[in-house]
Amino acid sequence: MQIGEAARRAGLTVKTVRYYANIGMVIPRQDETSGYRIYGEDDVAKLQFVGKARRFDFSVEECRELLGLYEDRNRPSREVKALTMKKVEEIDARLVELQSLKDELSGLAASCDGDHRPDCPILNALSGG
Amino acid sequence: MQIGEAARRAGLTVKTVRYYANIGMVIPRQDETSGYRIYGEDDVAKLQFVGKARRFDFSVEECRELLGLYEDRNRPSREVKALTMKKVEEIDARLVELQSLKDELSGLAASCDGDHRPDCPILNALSGG
DNA sequence: CTTTACCTTCCCCTTGGGGGAGGCCCTATC
DNA sequence: GATAGGGCCTCCCCCAAGGGGAAGGTAAAG
């Protein structure tokens, strides 16, 4: 199939699929006469795999790694689990950070009257050292 | 003072301060003969303000807006509060999204033995439609 | 034969700067 | 006077992960 259908079936944009071909992540067959990319069922499966991993917040490089493990019939599941745990930890750290940001900001917002007057504790907090 | 000291005092890198000058966020005076940027105390205050707002996850454009409000002695605090609340909502949405990702991923990791065998529920989940 | 849809490559754009090259400016030291 | 050093300048390319669109080739349908 052509790139359009492969992209549709993988739930990705054509641009994205072409990008994955360019960076050597999912490399399709090439039609000699037309120059068109030709995708097979296995390629679509890989594209779906990568798409899903991306939605799980894995970076493109991590997806490449996961894809390598996915294609290796003899890989130890240990490696996949380690990568996943690392990602969970990253997400956790970001969660803590964002939560703290949210707390500070909503505390500031609560202390601000939000009326027509110029006095604003938010700006005061931002300008204070 | 020169850019190096201004950056130090604002807790930013020289690159960042120069960038803020280039995009018209904090514009210093210019020494005619040397071409050096000359920063005053008020510029340092603005740089600190922007740096702090950035740490609060405001985008550069939002910082520009906040800085405008900061410099306007007659601004209504309503505007600042609205911007802050919007940012809090964004952070909240991202928190929900990340939490859901974390739950899914840690559920997967928990279901994976993580041993030497190739069977891996994580990869199975990623490859399943 | 022509339209239309699909495909190709190529290049610039995004965020928020980082890294480094090549070249001034200024001061200190020899 | 020369030279070394540090700080500064502009200019250009780089990152992630593609998006947008131009210019042009190809295939299928009317």
Image: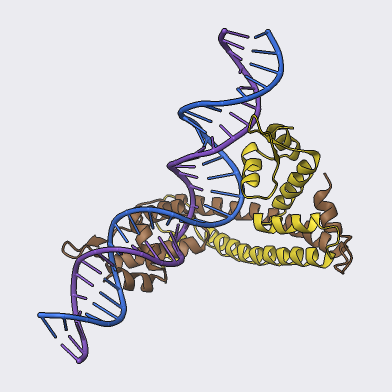
Chain colours: A yellow, B brown, C purple, D blue
B28 sits left or right of B69 in the view: left
Can residue B11 be seen from the camera position used here?
yes
Residue C9 % position (x, y)? 54, 38
| Most foreground residue, C21 or A57 | C21
Q: How many labels, in total?
A: 0
Q: Does residue A117 show up? A: no
Q: Quadrant of residue A30?
A: top right
Q: Residue sitting at 41 percent across and 68 percent down? A: B13
When the figure is inspected, residue A26 is found, relative to residue A7, above or below; the finding is: below
Q: Quadrant of residue B39?
A: bottom left
Work out whether A86 lies above or below B71. Answer: below
Q: Is residue B53 left or right of residue B33?
A: right
B35 to the left or right of B114: left
Query: What is the quadrant of residue D29 in the picture?
Result: top right
Front residue of B42/A120: it is B42
Is the C terminus of chain B in the top left, top right, bottom left or bottom right quadrant? top right
Report whether A121 appears left or right of A8: left
**Percent position (x, y) of residue A49?**
76, 48
| The N terminus of chain B, quarter of image | bottom left
Q: Position of residue C3 (x, y in %)?
A: 58, 12
Q: Residue at x 31, y 68 (%)?
A: B3
Residue occupying the far front of the picture: A32
Q: Locate residue B27, reporting x and y percent.
A: 30, 58
Q: Residue at coordinates 69% horizontally, 59% vertically from top-left?
A: A62
Q: Residue at x 71, y 32 (%)?
A: A2
